[in-house]
Amino acid sequence: MTGRRGARPPFPLVLAAGVVVCLLLLPLAYLVIRVAGRGGDALEILGERATWRLVANTVLLVVSVVAAAVLVAVPLAWLVTRTDLPGRRFFGTAAALPLVIPSYVAALCLLGLPDLVEWAPEVSGYWGALAALTLATYPYVFLLAQAGLRDLDPSLEEAARGLGVSRRHVFRRVTLPTLRPAVGLGALLVALYTLSDFGVVSLMRYDALTRAIYLQYRSLFDRTPAATLALLLVGLTVVALTLEYRTRRGGRLYRTSPGAARRPEQIRLGRWTAAALAYCSLVVGAFLMLPVAVLVAWLARGIANERDLEAPVAAAVDSLTASGLAATVTVLAALPVALLAVRFPSRRSRVMERLAYLGNALPGLVIALSLVFFAARYASPVYQSLALLVFAYAVRFFPQALSGAESTLQNVSPRYEEASRGLGRGMLATLTAVTAPLARSGLLAGAALVFLSAMKELPATLLLRPIGFETLATEIWKLTQIGAYSRAAVPALVLIAVSAPVLWLLSSERRVESTGTG
Amino acid sequence: MKVLAALAVIAAAIAAAGCGDDESGPLTVYSGREEELVAPLFEQFTAATGIEVEVRYGDSAELAAAILEEGDGSPADVFFAQDPGSLGALGEQLAELPQETLDRVDAAYRDADGRWVGTSGRSRVLVYNTGAVAETDLPSSVFDLTDPAWQGRVGIAPTNGSFQAFVTAMRLTAGEERTRQWLLDLQENGANTYEKNTPIVEAVAAGEIDLGLVNHYYVPLVKQEHPDAPIANHFLELGDPGALVSVAGAGVLASSDRRGDAEQLVDFLLSDDAQRFYVEEAEEAEYPLVGGIEPAAGLPPLADLKGPDVDLTTFGPELEKTVELLRETGWLS
């Protein structure tokens, strides 16, 4: 599993990575099949002004959500990691928690707020979509920036300080640039999420591409225009991937000194403490407390109206099963792709790695229909089985596992693997006995992100789950569908409650890593 | 070791799935109608016939799209949908139903080719805030909604299937031009848009708007959540497009290898017991379509509601033009 620039990767590794990437490209193949038969119609759609207005709307939303997520998350990550902010432990966990709130639930809560309290503004359209999507996605940037700040080699900042550079300049010239790749990756995940999201833009009535895609399927049952619009989303993904790649070229600054990692110097906030506290409280209050408070208010209303509220135990079990399997499978699938990209960097391995992201901005419904198409026709034994559902999750959330695996493999020295191979261990044995344990933290982080996303997933789950298999997300959907919000609050709160410990594991794992050996 | 265990679990899942889809297993229904509303019907069917049923619940149109993608390999035996559009989209993937089944309902509420049949009816209505609008001030036609008196006070759901069906009805009865003008005037008059019916009714209940164009059964649903909500239905005048009566319906898949059982289920949905269910037990007070069964208390009889004189079964192909018109008039992008 060791390699150098220019070395030929072992064939089994290339094969494994190739198979994974081909499977990930199934949705794209489906779209091409749908468009190919009627290329003329597709061209006509591309020539329409309305289509490009949708693209412009979508780009506007993606850029705003990414900007908002970065602006919210980076200062927050810096405050809880590098300063003496009181209660930073609490804020560190609480600020990541909105990740477990499904974005459509967040949107419903924002929309339901004016109904509950007089002073709340009515949000919808652009601002509503921006608020709900920022809430749902800034934790990606927060978590990655936090990890980046923890892994930062303090000697860099110290050297700069030693050279007489002021603290403010160190932050701008040293801290921020080293953070750029982590923030870039977080921004990419945010952009992909926003491109693919349907729930929020539909509830907020913002005309993005996904809403038009759904409209084509739902009202017109015409699959060619839908596929054409979906391919436009893929085009936007290419743009996002290119931009993200540029942030990487700034170069990561790895820990260069050998030996144990040290904690970087803690910055005293002094008279800024109150302002910092206010900022953190505002973020946590708006993005975590507010939606939870709305859910609790709905629950209280349900109890007052004596509606039959039952604990969704079976649905919780099904959710945990499917999401747990999805996390395992996705990380296993990401490993060969990450190894190839990190250990054998070449143009070809890079293209392969980038291809793995391509389908990720497609809305869940499109991914689901593509798998319906292939599975019902060519793989009927797995159709509507748990295996196919898990596969769909893996296709949707692959980049989350890949980013975790890649970032951690970059920090595992190939020397250990070389030593293992030199001692006569085979490739697979080296992978399981040496590489995987050393890369544990990143793999677990990736698994946790996939797990959390799968817990919230709705559109693919609706079409692909085995009959009678109800997840918490489908329960929420079922009840909000008939306007029974007070009953939907129960599965929504259960979803948040069972997802939260995983997030806690994620942050404590990172903590162990940063204080352990470097 | 963990890796092997995970792989074993996946292999087992695949093996388990491979055992499905045999002829002796349960009948498979794809239902675009909500589980909360129709699950008891399937239980009654199993109790009456001994035929087990398993149901995949989802959005009507998404399930239709899935059946189209599945092609002949569809596991579904019966498709139970919210609207004629989803049923019509399946075309010849639905088999023709026996004439006796079709004859249970009025010809206006079933497919002209006999591939699906309506199982319950719903009327378009105007929901209004009883605190803000006096009953005597209510308009008698949707065409009155463009009056300046209602400026900014009306809610509609332009992406919703029922609303689009209503616009289709308006196009077919009042003509393309008048409909276009109405849509433009409504825009001018500051009507508010919502994603679906429920949010409209909730907005009316909250007093954000005073009137909304919805299906008749949403008022009781919202009242369960907010018992004191100041809302009521107003049925528009005879023949008005805003009084359109549409149906939910069912059809049998041509690819089903259990057509007999599947047809029995459709027959059951049209039986007196099942039709009475809509009146007596269902949370949604829908209209029964089979003759001789009265609608729930407080609802005007179906015969009095004859909305515009249109053929529901032509709505599928017409929908494209409706969506185009909505787009041109700025209601959709």
Image (cartoon, grey):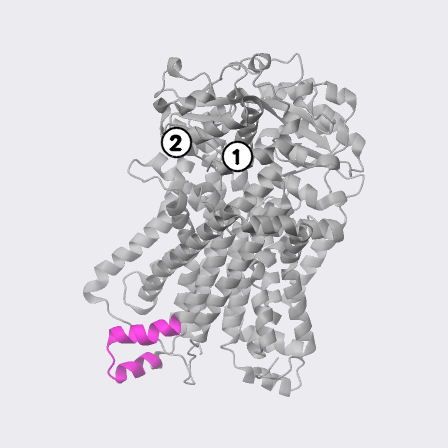
For this orientation, the residue located farthest to the bottom is A422
Task: Give B247 or B41, whichever is nearer the viewer.
Answer: B247
Residue A265 drawn above or below residue B266: below
Q: Amino acid at mark 2?
A: Glu
Report the magenta residues as a range.
A156-179
Instruction: State which quarter of the image contains the C terminus of chain A.
Output: bottom left
- The earlier-in-sequence mark between 1 and 2 is 2
Task: Give B226 or A22, whichever is nearer the viewer.
Answer: A22
Whole-Å distance between the Cαs marked 1 and 2?
16 Å
* Horizontal and vertical percent position of residue A445: 50, 65
Q: Which residue is labeled 2 in the image?
A: B188
* Horizontal and vertical percent position of residue A237: 52, 60
Disc 2 residue crowd, few under 14, some 14–19, many 20+, Cα 10 Å: few
Q: Which residue is labeled 1 in the image?
A: B325
Residue A174 drawn above or below residue B7: below
B127 inside magenta stretch: no
- Write the residue at 55% across / 36% down: B323
* Horizontal and vertical percent position of residue A402: 55, 66
Side of B163 relative to B106 (left or right) = left
- Write the residue at 64% across / 70% down: A17
Q: Amino acid at mark 1?
A: Leu
